Image (spheres, grey):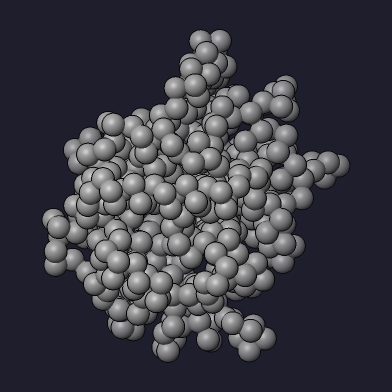
Amino acid sequence: MTAGDGPPSRPPTLDDPIDFAGTRLRNRLYRAPLLECAGNGPDAVDRLIADLEPAAAAGAGLIHQGATIVREEGGCAAPEMTRVHDPDFVADLARLTDAVHAHGSRIAIQLEHGGLRSMEVWHDGYRRATPDLHQLAVSRPPRVLRVLDRLGFLDLSPRVMDTDDVERLAADFGRAAARAADAGYDAVHIAGANMGLVQQFLSPFYNRRTDRFGVDSAIGPDDTRGVGTAFLERVAEEIRDRAGDVPLLTKVPSERPTPPGIGPHLSDDDAVAACERLVDAGFDAVVPVRTSVFWDMSVVRGTFPAAAWRDERLRDGFREAFGSLPRAAAVAAGNWLESLVYDREAGWNRDLCRRVRGRVDAPVLCEGGLRERSELDAALAGDADLVGMGRPFYAEPKLPARLLGERVDPTARAVCADCNNCAVAQAAGESGVCRTPAVLRQAGELRRQGAYDRPDTDASRGDANADD
């Protein structure tokens, strides 16, 4: 944090500006990373502009382009994820950053590799199309995943990375960050959660390495289990060497939602310790989140997406993903059981963020279940420095227009129903959009009432180039 982050006589609110690693944000609301499912085709950049520019036009201070893959093949956790290995493609993304900057907003790119969460593990059609593609693994896969492999729900053919492989992957993150900085991105966000490869390095559930990228030496003798921050630290070094002082942030997971009997996994204490070490290692901000060691509903929470699983238009996509409709039904049953365990609660990461904020000298970003203006302001009052939302933007691309402004009703709330129909459809290869008619009708009525209208004048934009 830096001076001038808000009036000292009161806690900061959503409308207050903030200096973020030398970059001025006009307010403290950000669009959290989502799957845009834009791919890399000839219309990919135009699709990203269509998805992300509305949030900038509506006033969001910071916008994330969701998880993008740093390598040419492998590593995608869902169909049609965008890759940023091609310099020419990334250079064309300057059209996106220019569009966001024209409205006075800032944009970050989230870099990822899926590792054992990649499509080559779980997506039947993709595995058949790429039979020689092996997934990257930090260590030998945990036993529970090997059991699922024997039962036919997964297809494990891991390539366990040696030390040189890890160095090459870190360099790929650095090269991708450098291309993004050249294309005008204002920050680089490393996807450190949601069971991606970076979380697999952090977590003792996945990381049993004995080289310097293991967990034993990551935090020190005062930590009982250790957290594998060494890979993230090496990524930071590569990014600094190749992309200079571009602001750098990462998600940091606590794996507390992991089902009983599964472990070892990261506790809240481990996540706090990891945040401290990563800030000391040069990360400019952290995003503490609670997520399981599995890709499950601990990530999104909310209700069981029954409508999506029953949607006949998605059946072919589910059959392609899971190999057959009976197998898709088994996955849906597991999804239903998870929905009973992971109840939605407003701001489920707030207390973890509060702990981290008391221990690090860097901005802390909070997301997860925040939906109402009053909740966002409450989180800023003591838990975090910036607050964000993800899935609500699928239904309301211009949501910030309803939440920002000193005269906004504090009970103003996103129309998102946390039904998760948007998320599960992505497994079937569908784009990230709201698919719940009642929610779309409510958003449509607000649009007809002019709720998303926002004057885009010089006064509302501020100076998009003011960095001091």
Location of residue 393 with respect to 256 vertically, above or below: above
Camera-side residue of 237 and 3: 237
Residue at screen point 73% across, 34% down: 374
Looking at the image, residue 16 sits to the left or right of residue 172; the answer is: right
Give coordinates of residue 42: x percent, y percent.
19, 38
Most extreme residue toward the front is: 326
Residue 316, can we see it? Answer: yes
Considering depth in this image, is 131 or 352 the residue closer to the camera? 131
The residue located at (50%, 24%) in the rendering is 439
- Examine the rendered structure and indicate whether residue 29 appears above or below residue 236: above
**Residue 302 x/y as whole percent:** 55, 42
Residue 309: image quadrant is: top left
| Residue 216 versus residue 416 in the image, above or below | below
Residue 103 horizontal side relative to residue 134, left or right: right
Side (left or right) of 468 relative to 12: left
- Outermost residue toward the top in this view: 449
For the N terminus, the quadrant is: bottom right
Residue 107 can be seen, yes or no: no
Relative depth, front residue between 413 and 249: 413
Q: Is residue 452 left or right of residue 19?
A: left
Q: How many numbered markers are drawn?
A: 0
- Could you say where residue 312 lies in the image, as x and y percent from the top left? 28, 31
- Residue depicted at 49% across the width and 41% down the height: 304
Q: 406 or 18, which lies in front?
A: 406
Residue 191 image point, x, y percent: 45, 58
Q: Residue at x 36, y 34 (%)?
A: 310
The answer to which quarter of the image holds residue 378 is top right
